[in-house]
Image (cartoon, coloured by chain):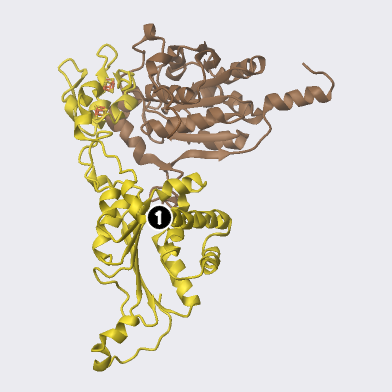
Chain colours: A brown, B yellow
Amino acid sequence: MTEAPAPEFVIREYLREHLMPHFLCPGCGHGIALRALLWAVHELGITKDRLAIVSGIGCSGRIGAYVDANTFHVTHGRPLAFATGLKLARPDLEVVVITGDGDCLAIGGNHLIHACRRNLNITCMMLNNEVYGMTGGQVSPTTSNSRYTTTTPLGNFEPTFDACALAEGAGAGFVGREITLQTPALKNLLREGLAYPGFAFIEVISDCTEIYGRKNDLGNSAEMVLSQKAAARPDVYTNSVDRPFRPNQLRTGVLARKDRPEYAAARQRHLQSLGNVE
Amino acid sequence: MTTGTPKEVITAAALTAPSARAQERPTNVLIVGVGGQGVIMISKVIALLCERQDLDVKQSEVHGMSKRGGSVFSHLRFGQRVYSPTIPIGEADVLVALEWAEGLRWLPFLNPETGTFLADTQQLIPPFSCRSRKPGAVTNYARHTVAEVAGKVPNCFATDASRMAAELGNARAANTILLGMLSTALDFPEQEWLTVIEQLVPKKTIGANLRAFAAGRTWVEQHDPAAMHAEAPAVFPAAADLGDYVARSAPEINAAWCKGCEICVKFCPERCLFMNDRQVAELKDPDLCTRCRVCERLCPDFAITLHRLDA
Ligand code: SF4
Ligand code: SF4
């Protein structure tokens, strides 16, 4: 309270304003997630020159381009691979990967598990809207049971991936999940992830109003955002709520935090032990 | 908490001998505050002290609504014989208040001739005293300053114990500072207080609590109740200070970026936004806006801005 307050977060200072308004559909949760990310960046005092955003293909991949920082829009599913190279070459950069459920879990699934395994100091924000929105609404690895998409006209029957459990199992040092409706909580989670010295995987529950929502009759944007709240089960709710009435509830908050050797440091140590110092 | 004294039959003679009974009159300590401040802890300390001195002690507390900052109080009576656990109005020898307004609420219980009022001037403003949700708006919180109260009670010692505790490194030890202050008003040896505190507080916090106790004790020793008049009064924002507040605060909506998703309209808690006939969000009533920023944070198109107030 006594220290001078940091300048307030004004998102325009972080946007390429000439590209705005952005291309996302009305009510798309990705915009809210981007705000939370930039807000966290602002609070950590990361300058735009030090921020590098790497994104893949899809609606999620496009949002990186609106950030007035170093941005790379790379091939489908490969942002984590590009980011790994970037972080190793330029350790001074704060590397953030923005990816989607299809980009990260299907096409880039292999890159995800190996990024988790290596535990390089990058932050991966995966926007989960349960569908391939940009390419016309195909089923994705996180599409809920019995939902309609263009490729599941009779309803989806495939089991879904729990992305956080996957990342944790593959060894990610920091794993968290949050909904876009709780923007300040999402900001705090992203801030924690950015500050974590290792691979931070953060799943953001987003909403695709126009394609997924429309096809499945999930209501307007406000209703879709609100429904996230009904599904979420924040990690602060322990004890009584730990035995939920609805077993499918999504756990949110920090789901895992481990103390594992960071990849770049481990690599450096290994080279040193060989007398081959860079 | 009651120590075992067998129930005695009170004879009519005993009731009509006021002078003899007055000597036996128990000491009354009333401790008040809000949930989570440690009211009960203070009364436990005194009760244990009394037990160690072989005094009869009775305690009665209400803490039902305490979980969310609701009122908590504890009546504590000790002496050779204590019959009733509650303190009658006007008979508390010491009133210990862990929160300023709670202290004021219980002042009628203080003995008007000899009572001692020990208070933390910390203000915990309850939500229902905020009619307007605008930041910095006038609240209905008690407006009495320390100087005003000091002029009306026999002995008044009021200080910002919470800040003192925070400066000592543990803001939660404010109640122990009050205990230190209280130790000067009750007739128990200092060492007894320290022993009981050590026994009652969690092991890790013994050091912090003993430091807080000493700070409270020294503070009273160094202060003359008469000087309390000079103590800085609590500061309240005057209605006039809010002047042009609304004009500067209303959110700006960038119509060119708005895609008409209606999220802001549906989520604004004050209902001050609406969709105009071009399906663009518009501000209906800037006076209603409390700058809660829900609309700004949820607009997926960054179309809403609440400008910095300091500009
Ligand atoms: S800041 Fe936005 S949501 Fe909050 S009261 Fe004002 S218009 Fe409504
Ligand atoms: S939330 Fe933003 S885009 Fe949606 S209606 Fe409001 S101002 Fe327009």
The reply, left or right, for residue B38 in relation to residue B264 is right
Provide the residue designation for mark 1: B37
Vertically, is A63 above or below B96?
above
Label 1 Cα neighbours within 10 Å, binned few <14 / some 14-19 / many ≥20? many
Q: Residue at x 50, y 14 (%)?
A: A48
Task: Locate residue B292: give its quadrant.
Answer: top left
Q: Chain of mark 1?
A: B
Q: Position of residue B24 (x, y in %)?
A: 35, 82
Task: Locate residue B267: give its quadrant.
Answer: top left
- Asked whether the viewer can see residue B277, the reply is yes
Q: Nearer the viewer, residue B108 or B69?
A: B108
Q: Nearer the viewer, residue A173 or A191?
A: A191
Q: Quadrant of the N terminus of chain A?
A: top left
Q: Position of residue B299 (x, y in %)?
A: 31, 23
Vertically, is B174 above or below A63?
below
The reply, left or right, for residue A81 in relation to residue B107 is right
- Looking at the rendered structure, the kind of residue marked 1 is Gln
Tag count: 1
Q: Position of residue A131 (x, y in %)?
A: 42, 25
Task: Locate residue B119: give its quadrant.
Answer: bottom left
Quadrant hosting ligand 2: top left
Q: Position of residue A141 (x, y in %)?
A: 48, 29
Vertically, is B97 above or below A3?
below
The reply, left or right, for residue A89 in relation to residue A30 is right
The residue tagged with tag 1: helix, strand or loop? loop
Q: Nearer the viewer, residue A184 or B187?
A: B187
Q: Residue furthest right?
A: A275
Q: Quadrant of the C terminus of chain A?
A: top right
Q: Residue furthest top?
A: A18
- Asked whether the viewer can see residue B119, the reply is no
The answer to whether mark 1 is within 8 Å of ligand 1 is no
